[in-house]
Amino acid sequence: MTYIGNPQGTGFSKIDSQQFSGTGSATAFTMRHPVSQAEHVAVYVNNVRQDPHMAYTVSGTTLTFTEAPSNATNNIYVVYLGGAINTTELPTDVTLGVKGGIINAPSIFKHGEIQTGAYFPAANTVALVQGGKEILRANNSLLELKISGTTVATINSTGMNITGSVFDDGTALGSITANTQLGSGVVTAHAIASGNITSTELRSSGLLTANTQFASGIITQHAIASGNVVTSTLNAGAVTDAKIAIGTISGSKLATGAISANTLIGSGVVDASNIKADAIGPQHIQDGAVNANTMIAANIIDASNIKAGAVGASELATGAVSANTKMAADVVGARELRIGNVAAANGVFTHNAHTYAKAQRSRVETVTVGAANVTIDLANTNVFNLTLGTNSNLNRPSNITVGQAGTIFVSQDGTGSRTLSYSSVWDFVGGTAPTLTTTASAVDRIDYVVFSTSRIQAVASLAYS
């Protein structure tokens, strides 16, 4: 009678075991079989069984010790206790049928060869193993054929993909014909050997369309026979400056009349280096060719290119001369400088004494003092009006220039009792700084002259009404 299991009296099912050699530092070792719980293996180090709750852990095929075992040969061995639970020793030379299949079986191995058989690597997937390497894996959507674990062919709902050539009794099959359809990217520059396609092998009308892409350098002057391209077959935009090599078109190749009044020339195509000297004369520039926006290079227009009287008073447009315009000596005479043409902030007179026919006034800069220090800028004006809103110190002014003179009005605010101290640059008569009037809304005056960049002589007049 045939049955599943061990014959009576033969003992237990086969239990696998494995040895390792400790190094004194290594804590992780790779087992032959994946293990889910530490209790599924019995681990011995130097013939002492280890506690599965403290001495080691397992994760898949990795056995990890909490402390590195000592350095010795085969001083560690593992007994796979869990392997016996899911292993069935089948009787030899019999046909076995299992009603309903094998449920949740992790593996079925050939007797005596633990690395050859069938196993289930993932859900709904079965694989065959020979010598520890997969030779076939299949699920409901993909079949993979392998040699020593390397995939050589795959089959799915779209077809078969084979690595390498297909042979018939040792002879490679010529499976590509004139009607064979090749997928996108199957044939590339690397897939066609140099010289395999010649000029006589490119056939069939319509093989090349307006959208055909050619690699750089494929079409040259030598590849197009004389007369093959006429004006009616060159689409707009087909030829750009990037597609014509420098020197390809010379004076002898540009036919008379090729460029007409309606020809459009791209930006930068014609520049000073492309037009010979004297190629454009006065008679070649049409009326309106130069307008207000025309850019003319430096030195193109000089005194020799503009006739005497060519530019009259009415021909210099408003705004043509700006603050940055440079004029030659004696170009602008005394009678040509109109009232208002020199702004007060920019007019500088560098020589000769000047007599003013009208009064000259200084702008008064008002400063409300609300901080412990106040700094006036002598580049702004000569006269300042400081209103004290707190006790403050008059710092060294910025932009001190020797010879500048002016006045500082010091006013108390509506509260009064504000004091003002002074930086050492301020030099009062007798070396004594004045004590200001502290009555609310009182006004004092300090007149100053800059003696040096580190000394300003000052006189205070106090208690104005």
Image (cartoon, helix red, strand yellow):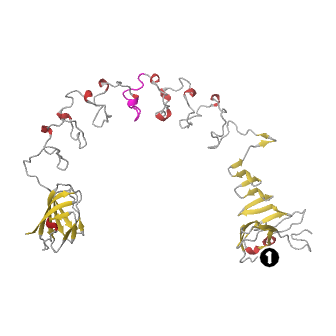
Residue 105 visible in the shown view: no
Q: Quadrant of the C terminus?
A: bottom left
Local crowd at mark 1 within 10 Å, few (<14), some, or many (≥20)? few
Q: Is residue 272 magenta?
A: yes
Q: Is residue 358 magenta?
A: no
Q: Which residues are magenta?
A: 256-273
In the rendered structure, the answer to whether residue 404 lies left or right of residue 46 reads left
In the rendered structure, the answer to whether residue 368 lies left or right of residue 273 reads left
In the rendered structure, the answer to whether residue 252 lies left or right of residue 376 reads right
- Residue 203, given in percent of the width and then of the height, sits at 63, 31
Residue 350 visible in the shown view: yes
Q: Is residue 355 above or below residue 285?
A: below
The kind of secondary structure element at disc 1 is: strand
Residue beneath the point at 70% across and 37% down: 177
Q: Quadrant of the N terminus?
A: bottom right
Foreground pick, 84 / 332: 332
- Residue 113, given in percent of the width and then of the height, sits at 84, 62
- Residue 401, given in percent of the width and then of the height, sits at 20, 55
Foreground pick, 158 / 439: 439
Foreground pick, 186 / 436: 436
Q: List the single residue furthest toward the front.
A: 430
Q: Quadrant of residue 287?
A: top left
Question: Which residue does the numbered mark 1 point to in the structure image?
Answer: 48
Residue beneath the point at 38% across and 30% down: 272
Q: Quadrant of residue 211?
A: top right
Q: Amino acid at mark 1?
A: Val
Majority SS type along the magenta span: loop
In the rendered structure, the answer to whether residue 228 lies left or right of residue 68 reads left
